[in-house]
Each structure stands twice: as structure tokens, then as C-alpha cells.
Amino acid sequence: MKKVALTLMTGVLALGLAACGANGSQPNVGGDANQGSSTDARTYFMNPKSIGPAYWAAAEKGAKRAADDLNVEVLFNAPTEADSSKQINMIQDMLTRKVDGIGVSPNDAKAVGPVFKKAAGQDVKIVTWDSDAPETDRQYYVAPATDQEVGELLARTIGEEIGGSGKVAFMVAGLGSQNQIAKSDAAKAYFAANYPDIEVVTTVASDDDQQKAYANAQNLIKTYPELRGIIGFAGGEPPAAAEVVEQAVKAGTLEKNQIAITGIAVPSVVKNYIKNGTIKTDIIWDPGKLAYATVYILDQLAQGKEITDGMEIPTVGAVKVDGQNVFIGTLEVTADNVDSFDF
Amino acid sequence: MSAWLSGFSLKSNKLLVQLVLLLFILVLFSILSPYFLSVANFMNVLNQMVEVGLIAIPMTMIIISGAMDLSVGSILAFSAVSMGVAYQQGVNIWVSVGIGLLAGLLCGAVNGYLIARHRMQAIVVTIGMLVMLRGLVYVINEGRPISGFPDAFYFLGQQYIGGIPFNAIFLVAMFLLASFVMKKTRFSTYVYGIGNNEEVVRYSGISVVRVRFILFMLSGLFSAIAGVFLVSRLASAEATSGTNIELDVITATLIGGTHIFGGRGSLAGTFVGLLIIVFLRNGLNLLGVSVLYQAVILGALLLLAAGNKKFNGE
């Protein structure tokens, strides 16, 4: 009897938590998602690399807005860590839910191949965003610009700031991530072609862990006292580098402006560093618009409409379509415009 | 499979609570989500639970013996990447699989040697291995995923036989085999004995060192097998594979009624515990519940399992 009571209690608890979980995620969902009566509303699954970082939180807002504007249902979910197998399990679960389309930012470009094939077999629309999975069944890739363009832009920015010669270090989120590899390779190639006097001394990876990024930056300035520049290829890296450099300047171990920093970071996170000049230029795109454009394109595909070059996406603007790639454009954040961003 | 499970429940009553909870979860999600109760979804879940399940077999035995292996996720990645690198060097794929399994056995042997022979704390040793092996994995492949395996290899993780995923069939076969070993052989008596009172077992003239050594070797081997199946399922060997998998494995084991201090527990319980966590996660995914709440629910379940004596089958 006690056992039965206990089991009931456990069940009620689980149910309660599930219910509050569903309530918590309700804003993600345009319409009556929890009834499962999605007979008329089109449903899309938006799957970032992980849940937690500010970057993905900003993307979630954009995806929600798209759901409201287009009157569709959007589920935004991912594992708490950037883990490929958990991400793929989640996509598989969503395929059994019979969503109309999936927007995925793959943790591993190759590993999503089989699950994309399965999705394509079920006539589910597939769009990758933020990070691509070429050589799979994905139909489009939504990005701010090509990884090569972003990598070159970062290399050019730092090249100009340090006057074309000196030692530069790269800070990346993950050594295995396709978009990080492509961007850092492009930056290296740009240095080799345009600034032969710039030497890339090392590439350190934080695995998207803020504390690790911070420790990496500390090690960099200790190991390479001659260091002139740091490029951070993901959202957590430039603020970590800037914080470490500022502290070193304060402690007197480093001269102000000896190390130039640029990278990809959300304006709100690097606002202070830009205002006091530790970072001069920061490259960013609006992750919310990226997610918005992804949902919009999924919806167009689900309705059988064409994706054309120069097409106008509401709130995002005109996009450039090149083959299977959709580019929404990048922004340069400087001291002049840093206050104008709301993310 | 349900016939198999009920066969066990008749023999051991303490499984009843877990089974009722599993049933409750199944019924609950069937009502809440129209997509849950379908053959396709169940096969999908079976396909996903294999890696955690394979590692849970030796983990159950190790926890019964009063120890713990936290290095399983890193061993999984180490084996997977060793296999991938071997294949990239032009080694035949099945020989590469053999190399991966050997790598896992070797890691298990190191764990076993330090813990059994030198009587070092299992938690300390395996945390050391967890960190060191993960680092080695990054050294071996420079963090870049390895893919492009031959189609024949994908059979392991992606093929269905008679509508059932091959890897799930393999998992069930392994559970049945291990369950037989843990019920009928003298080895199992030693394992339970060590968990209850190591000294008595030693004074009875039984080599505790050997039993412990075998257990950690088994853990290394099964982690490696899980690694091979994971690579086959995902078509890619990554440096991050298996991160935090030990938490899922231990959660399944504890929800399945194995006592954290050893001496008590069963593989049948672990299997049901495993089903509980995979179906719970799948159902919550289908409902679109954010992973943040999923973690809360799973944690609460574990607290209940560990905290309640009835649940532990006392």
C-alpha cells in the first residue's frame, strides 16, 4: 500500500513538474501547442547548439517573434551542453512528433547526416543556421556571411589595428566545430596573403566554457609577452580576452593598447570594453534575426514557395541567396554605435 | 520484451515499484502527447538508449561491489577516437573496431590495476582517468571529428532487423547474458559479497583483487563497445562523445534500485531504471518541455529514488 502511495506521489510530482515545464516554455509556442492538435498550425523545431549562452537566448527571442508573426508553432530546445549525440536524440524525437521543418545548428556537421536523411525521407524541411552541415540533406544554410568572409573581416580588422606585423593568437569555442575551423582557417589564409609579417602563434579552445576562456586568455598573455593581437571567434572569447587584458593593464604587467582585441561577441556583453577602448571593433550579427530568417525560410519551404536572391524577409530585410546559402549580413560594433543595439 | 520483464518482476518484488512508475510514465505521456504511443517512437527510444544501457551493465556490478567508475564517458570517447584514427590510417574497419575495444580494455585495466592492486580509492582513480583520457582524446585527433566510415559499419547503429534496431537487440542480449551471470554464477556471489563485507570475502580465501580487476576491465570493455555503437549510430567519432554519460548511467542504476553503498541491486532493476529515464526524456521532448525543466525533473526523480528506502528495495 505504501509503495502504491509512493508511486502515485512520484507520478504526481513528475506530472506537476512537467506541467510547469510546459507552462514555462509556452511563450515559445505560438498557439495551443500543448494540446497536440497541430492539425492546421505548421510546427517547426528550432535547435541551437545548446541552451544557456546569451547568444542562443537572443536567438530564441527572434524565433518566438517569427512564430507570432507567421502564425506558426515554434519549439526551441537543445541540450544544456553542446553535445552532438544528445542533440541528435532530440532531433529524432521531434521527427516522431511529425514537425514540418527543423532548423538545426549542428554541433558536428557530419554526425547529423543520418538524421537529416531520415528527416528528408519524411518530407521534413531542413535548414541549418549559424553552423552548417554541408554534404547532408539540408536544403538551406542561413548565416550572417560566409565563414570565409567573417574570418577575413576579423583578420583585416586586427591587421589594420596592429599595423600589419606581430604575434596574434586565436581563441575559439570548439576545435571540432565546423564554423570555428572554417573561420580560423580563413583568417590564417588572409594573414598569409596580406600580412606576411603577422604570425599566428597558437589557437586555444574554451569548449564554450566562460571560465576556461578566461584561463586561456591569462595563459596567452603570460606565455607570449610579445603578443600584439587576439581574435575571439565565438561569443565568449572576446569578453574573456578583454577582461584579462584590462586587469593586466591595471596591474601594470601590460601596457595599454599593446594587445588589440577583436572578435565575434554580442554587443551587450562587450559594451564596457568597447567604451573604454580595450576592444575597438567587434563583429556581430543579430542572432534573433538569424533565427527569425531561419523560421521564415522553413515556413516558405513548407508552403512550397521559392527562396530567391534579394527576397525581403520582414524585420530582417533583404537577404543574399547564393546557391543553398542565405546570408543576412554582419554588423560592425564600435564605440560610436554600441549603444544602438538591443541585444 | 515485456514478457521478459514481467518474468523478473514475479521473482523479485522490489522491481514492482519501478515497473509501476515506468507504466505510469508510459500512460501519462500517451495521454499528453499523440505522438508518444507509436512503434516508430518506441524503436527510436530503444535506438537512443543503447550506449547508456551498455555501460550501465558493468556499472551496476561495480556499484553492487561498493565502488564507482566515473571514467566511462572518457573511455567511450578514447575508444571511439582510437578506432576512428586507426581507420583513417588505412586499417580495415573491423580491425579498427578491435583496436577501439582493446583501447577500452586497456583503460579498464589501468583503472583495475590502481584500484584493485594498489587499493586506491575508485572515485579518485576514475576521476583522474576521466580528466586524463579526455585530454588524450583531444591530443589524438586535435579535436576534429572523424567520419567517412564504410556503410557496412553503420549496420551496427543504424540498421533495423524485423523493425527493431540491431543495437537494441544487442543491448537486450547483453542484459540477459549479464543477468544470467549475476544470478547463477559464483562470480556474482563474490561481487555481492565484496559490496556487503569485503573483509569476510577476503578471509574466505577469495581474491578480491581479481574480482575488482575483472569488474573494471568489464567496464572499460563495455564503454568501448558503447563507443563503437555510438560512432556507428552518429557516423562520426568526436572528441566530445560521451561527455557526462556517467551521470545518465549512474542515474539509471540508482533509479533501478541499486544501493549506492553496494551489496544490493539487480540488472533487471537497472534495465527498468534505464527505460524510465529514456522514456521520461523522450516524452518531455515530444511535449516541447525545455531541457532546463527536464534536468529538474530527472534530478527530483533521482532524489526520490536515493532517498526512499522502499524504492531501494529494503
Image (cartoon, rainbow, N blue to C red):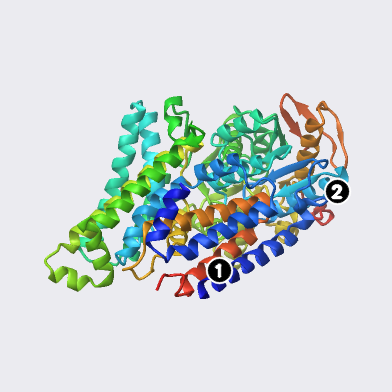
Question: At 59% from the left edge and 58% from the top edge, which residue is drawn?
Answer: B25
Q: Position of residue A174 (x, y in %)?
A: 54, 46
Query: Numbered disc 2: what chain?
Result: A
Query: Numbered disc 1: what chain?
Result: A
Q: Quadrant of the C terminus of chain A?
A: bottom right
Judge by depth and name the residue closer to the eye, A129 or B173. B173
- Marker disc for residue A343: none
Q: Is residue A315 above or below residue A147?
A: below
Residue B42 in the figure: left or right of residue A308: left
Q: Amino acid at mark 1?
A: Thr
Q: Secondary structure at mark 2?
A: helix
Q: Which of marks 1 and 2 precedes in the sequence? A: 1
Question: At 79% from the left edge and 56% from the top edge, which residue is drawn?
Answer: A27
Quarter of the rendering containing residue B101:
top left
* Residue found at the very far top of the displayed protein: A323
Q: CA distance from mark 2 to mark 1?
A: 40 Å
Label 2: few (<14), some (14–19) or many (≥20) C-alpha neighbours in 10 Å: some
Question: At 61% from the left edge and 46% from the top edge, which residue is drawn?
Answer: A90
Tags 2 and 1 on a common chain: yes
Judge by depth and name the residue closer to the eye, A175 or B167. B167
Judge by depth and name the residue closer to the eye, B198 or B130. B198
- Marker disc for residue A7: 1
Residue A336 in the figure: left or right of residue B280: right
Q: Amino acid at mark 2?
A: Asp
**Residue labelled with disc 2:** A68
Q: Secondary structure at mark 1?
A: helix
Q: Position of residue A141 (x, y in %)?
A: 70, 33
The answer to whether one can see residue A195 in this image is: no
Marks 2 and 1: which is nearer the front?
1
Question: At 54% from the left edge and 70% from the top edge, which residue is drawn?
Answer: A4
Q: Position of residue A9 (x, y in %)?
A: 59, 71
